[in-house]
Image (tube, helix red, strand yellow):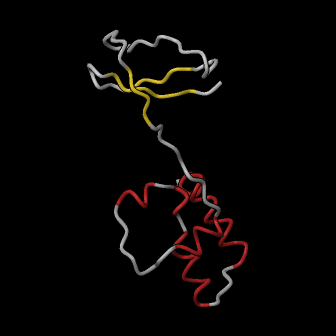
Amino acid sequence: MPIFEYQCSRCRKVSSHVVLNPKHRERRLCPDCGASRLKRVMSAFAVVESEASRLANFDTSKPRDESFYRDSRNIGLWAKKRARDLGVDLGTKFDATVEKARTGKLIKDME
């Protein structure tokens, strides 16, 4: 069952609707204002990227904003990339420490 998003022509709010049969034109109403003039809009989507791909595309010279560091996947990314660029193997202990930091276990262990 696909879920489509629609924007209300009156109040401009976006709402999600389950569509049981796309060929069957069902009358949909805005859940906020009750208007019946809804326009289907493009839903947001995410792109999943592998760790290897993220490392390959990561530019260590580019400055990062605050939001970059809020994503736990980015913890240790700079160090891993720099080590790879320099041809240094930091070993499995480093990888384990990075994984602990990503999950928050490293901070808990320090407390």
Residues 50 and 1: in front is 1
- Horizontal placement of 11 versus 45: left or right? left
**Residue at 38% across, 15% down:** 30
Vertical placement of residue 43 versus 37, above or below: below
- Horizontal placement of 88 versus 40: left or right? right
In the displayed image of the protein, which residue is found farthest to the left?
10
Vertical placement of residue 55 versus 28, above or below: below
State the image quarter where residue 52 is shown: bottom right
Q: Residue 71 in the image: state x and y as whole percent.
A: 48, 55
Counting every numbered tag in the picture gives: 0
- Horizontal placement of 74 versus 68: left or right? right
The N terminus - image quarter: top right
Residues 40 and 1: in front is 40
Q: Residue 49 in the image: state x and y as whole percent.
A: 61, 59
In the displayed image of the protein, which residue is found farthest to the right?
92
**Residue at 34% across, 22% down:** 8
Q: Residue 12 in the image: state x and y as whole percent.
A: 29, 26
Vertical placement of residue 20 versus 104, above or below: above
